[in-house]
Structures are given as structure tokens and as C-alpha cells.
Image (cartoon, helix red, strand yellow):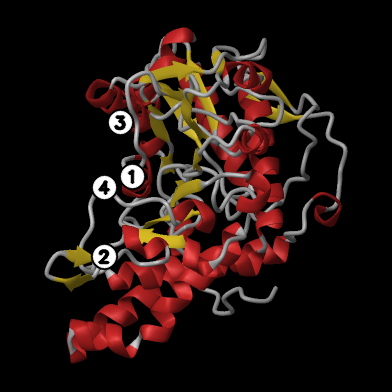
């Protein structure tokens, strides 16, 4: 497969030994001696996924961490592939050898190429991309550049991430704007028809999270974009859990602003993120804070904003991390985001079906086509205790507390929940290992 590393370091012997199972089949039976597979209609990998067993072996060879742990915390921070780490280390060594300023000057073409790579990833122009230290900062730089007044309305969803929501509340307190939650439909998913009914001349922003942090729900981001365009309402999309997991096309989405991180499904380093801002929208936006990089001082009483999205950047940056982000984006593109999505959904669907068959396990994902985040609880065992026991067996998951999505957690009366998030380099054998471990906790 073009673009994948050729040096084999840690080749797993269990890659896709088990046949892939359609999500609508009941594939596990809980017995006293453990989990047994039944009612499986054998399929070839090529019939359901573009990633072959050999592809997965090569991808795992690029991922040293899989030799030590089973990593199902990709919605938190995925395991970086070796090319990402190698690129960052090589850059840092160059800084140590010739100096930081000199290394960045020497690597100008490579650093500029990161903007091109991200533009290809999301379907934008390079001039519409700004690099940031994380997704939250990217989101804040976009949101706080907007202007609100008394009576203005900000529309969001019940599954919005807490960091975004507290920013809404702060701006509402400062300006007199109002924060309003778009009603959900009967399946507890944001209702686009309800959104359309809410639109009037006072709506100044629609801001939603595409894939919330606490489960596999995929909000109808493209439908929201059509509504926003029809009514000329600015649209801010938090794509933190989406980028690297599912295809992203900002033109099709119709968003004016999109933010994302490098550390999750893109498999980049921590401390990286980016902001997309549509060029026609950008020209009328001034960042809430500027420095001499984004707005050069051109006279005693005058500064000029850059014409591109880099007006949201500052002069200083972690260039090694930017190199790592660029490598991670190129790595994902070399695999193909469509292929990544199919593989992730297959793994997540099998995990979801298997966990749902265990007595005492409750699933908490919403939507009819959930993404690769599987949220669950175990009766009489707290989520943090579940995480601790799994970690003792070298299985990584995470816990999503109610404070991360307070509106959704309150309406559904959710406690701390366990979050397992497979990625394409995980295997079906690893899924079975996790399911078996959960079964042991339940018994």
C-alpha cells in the first residue's frame, strides 16, 4: 500500500484472524466459560473493507505501541506512528545542532507544506488554514472573533462540549446574547427541522460539535450547513473527533469555521490543532487578539491584518510539533480517509454489538450510524474502576464524565461512562480481548 512504512518492527500475529461480522448479527453468546462466537457469516476482508490483513500488519509495524498495550483510547490521543515521531525527533535534533531559528528557516518548504496537507484533508484552500496549539484554542480564536449584542442568539446542541458551552455563557454574560439549545428528535439526535424553525434575524451563530466526546453520535453537520447557508447564519463546526476518522469536505459541509486537533484520530502529536475559516467569511473577521505575525505594524497608528487565516496565529510556535502534524496528515491521506472510516466503523460496530450482548453492560451511544466511539457502563462497577481494571490488563480506554457534556448527561442521567474508541490499526482479536475482559469484570 503506497505511503505505508516498509520496516517491520512489531508485527502482530493476531491481525484479523477472526472473520468480520455484520453489525446487525448477534455475534456473541455469554456462557459460563466465557464468550463464544456464533452465527457468523464468513466474509473476505476485501468484501467489506479496503484495508487488507497485510495492510493492517504494515500499519501496526509502524505503531510500536501495539506491542505493549491494546489501545482503545484513540478519541483521547491515538498512538503516533513511527514516521510522525521520527519526523519530530529529526527536526528537534536539527534545532539542537544548528539553532531553532536556523532550523525553521532551513525547513521553510516543509513547514509550509503542512498547510497544503491540511487543505487537502478538509477540502479547503491553504490560505483558509491556521495552525494552533490545540483544537480548543482554534475554536476560541474563531468564536471570540465574532461580535454579539443584546438579544443576539447562539444556537447549539444538547451534546455540545463543555469547553465550548462555557464560552457561550461567558459571551452571553458580557454582551446580553442568549444561548439556546436546538431540540432533539425522538431518537435524541439534534433535529434539523427544529433548527430551521428557530432561525430568525436575531440568530448570529450556529455552533455544533460534529461527533460529541461522550459517544458515537454523528450530528447532521452537512444538513446544518445547508440551513445556515440558506439563512446566511455563520456556522462554527467543532470537528475534533471527526477529522482523521471520517471524510471531511468543508465545501459540502457548508461551515464557515471548522476546528480540529492533531492528537486524536489523525494520530499526530499533542499540542497541535488547526482552524479552517472560509475565505469570504474571513475577510470581515478580526481576531480578538493579534500579534505582529497576524497583524504587522505598518505605521505609528496603523496595523494591517494578514489576508489569510494565519491572522489567527502568533509568531512563536512549536515547529517540531507542526512537522509531526504534517506527517500525520500525510500518513492518513496515504491510507485514504474513506478506508479509515470503513475500518473504524467495522471495529466499533463489532465492539458495540459484543458489549451489548453481555448482561450488566449498558450502551450509551446515540444515532443510527454511530462513529468509532463506543460508550458503556457496567452495572454496580464505576467507570473509573472499569478503566483501572482494564489498564491492569494493558487495555487502554478512557472515562467521559458528566462534566464534559453536562446538558446531554443531565437529560439522560448519565454517570461517568467508559469510552472505548477503536482505530484502523486495532484488530478484531483486540476487540475480542476487550470484550472478554469486560465480561470478567461483570462476573
Q: How crowded is mark 4: few (under 14 residues within 10 Å), some or many (20 or more)?
A: some
How dense is the environment of label 2, judged by Cα within 10 Å: few (below 14), some, or many (20 and up)?
Answer: many
Q: Which mark is residue 145?
A: 1
Q: In this view, does 366 lie to the left or right of 268?
A: right
x and y, in percent, of residue 189 in the image: 61, 20
- The quadrant the N terminus occupies is bottom right
In the rendered image, the vertical position of residue 196 relative to residue 236, given as above or below? above
Residue 78 at x, y = what percent?
Answer: 45, 52
Q: Identify whether 14 is placed above or below 202.
A: below
* Residue 375 image label: none
> Where, by quadrant of the figure, is residue 184 drawn?
top right
Mark 3–mark 1 distance (CA, rounded to whole Å): 12 Å
Residue receiving disc 4: 288
Q: Is mark 1 on a helix, strand or loop?
A: loop
Viewer-nearest residue: 202 or 19? 202
Choose between 235 and 90: the one closer to the eye.
Answer: 235
**Residue that mark 2 sits on:** 295
Circle 1 Cα neighbour tier, 10 Å, few/some/many (<14 / 14–19 / ≥20): some
- Using the numbered discs, state the Cα–Cα distance from disc 2 to disc 3 in whole angstroms: 25 Å
Chain-order first, disc 2 or disc 3: 3
* Residue topped by disc 3: 167
Amino acid at each position: 500500500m503506497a505511503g505505508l512504512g516498509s520496516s517491520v518492527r512489531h508485527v502482530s500475529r493476531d491481525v484479523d484472524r477472526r472473520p468480520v461480522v455484520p453489525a446487525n448479527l448477534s455475534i456473541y453468546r455469554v456462557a459460563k466459560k466465557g464468550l463464544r462466537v456464533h452465527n457468523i457469516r464468513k466474509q473476505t476482508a476485501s468484501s467489506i473493507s479496503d484495508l487488507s490483513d497485510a495492510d493492517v500488519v504494515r500499519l501496526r509495524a509502524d505503531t510500536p505501541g501495539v506491542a505493549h498495550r491494546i489501545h482503545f483510547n484513540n478519541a483521547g490521543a491515538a498512538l503516533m506512528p513511527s514516521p510522525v515521531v521520527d519526523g519530530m525527533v529529526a527536526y528537534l535534533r536539527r534545532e539542537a545542532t544548528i539553532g531553532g531559528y536556523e532550523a525553521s528557516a532551513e525547513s521553510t518548504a516543509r513547514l509550509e507544506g503542512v498547510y497544503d496537507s491540511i487543505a487537502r484533508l478538509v477540502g479547503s484552500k491553504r490560505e483558509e488554514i491556521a495552525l494552533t496549539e490545540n483544537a480548543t484554542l482554534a475554536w476560541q480564536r474563531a468564536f471570540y472573533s465574532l461580535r454579539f449584542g443584546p438579544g443576539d442568539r447562539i444556537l447549539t446542541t444538547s451534546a455540545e462540549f463543555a469547553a465550548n458551552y462555557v464560552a457561550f455563557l461567558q459571551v452571553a454574560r458580557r454582551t446580553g446574547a442568549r444561548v439556546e439549545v436546538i431540540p432533539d428528535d425522538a431518537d435524541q439526535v439534534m433535529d434539523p427541522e427544529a433548527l430551521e424553525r428557530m432561525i430568525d434575524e436575531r440568530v448570529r451563530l450556529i455552533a455544533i460539535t460534529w461527533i460529541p466526546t461522550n459517544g458515537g453520535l454523528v450530528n447532521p453537520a452537512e444538513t446544518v450547513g445547508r440551513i445556515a447557508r440558506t439563512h446566511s447564519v455563520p456556522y462554527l463546526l467543532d470537528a475534533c473527533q471527526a477529522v482523521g476518522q471520517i471524510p471531511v469536505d468543508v465545501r459540502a459541509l457548508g461551515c464557515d469555521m471548522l476546528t480540529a486537533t492533531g492528537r486524536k484520530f489523525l494520530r499526530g502529536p499533542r499540542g497541535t490543532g488547526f482552524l479552517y475559516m472560509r475565505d469570504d467569511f474571513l475577510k470581515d473577521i478580526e481576531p480578538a487578539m493579534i500579534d505582529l505575525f497576524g497583524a504587522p505594524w505598518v505605521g505609528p497608528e496603523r496595523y494591517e491584518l494578514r489576508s489569510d487565516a494565519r491572522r489567527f496565529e502568533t509568531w512563536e510556535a512549536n515547529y517540531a510539533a507542526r512537522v509531526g502534524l504534517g506527517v500525520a496528515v500525510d500518513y492518513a491521506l496515504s491510507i485514504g480517509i474513506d478506508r479509515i472510516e470503513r475500518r473504524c466503523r467495522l471495529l466499533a460496530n463489532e465492539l458495540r454489538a459484543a458489549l451489548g450482548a453481555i448482561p450488566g453492560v449498558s450502551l450509551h451511544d446515540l444515532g443510527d450510524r454511530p462513529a468509532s466511539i463506543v460508550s458503556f457502563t457496567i452495572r454496580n462497577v464505576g467507570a473509573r474502576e472499569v478503566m483501572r481494571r482494564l489498564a491492569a490488563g494493558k487495555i487502554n480506554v478512557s472515562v467521559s464524565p458528566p462534566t464534559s457534556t453536562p446538558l446531554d448527561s443531565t437529560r439522560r442521567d448519565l454517570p461517568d461512562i467508559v469510552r472505548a474508541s477503536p482505530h484502523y490499526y486495532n484488530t478484531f482479536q483486540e476487540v475480542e480481548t476487550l470484550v472478554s475482559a469486560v465480561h470478567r469484570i461483570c462476573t
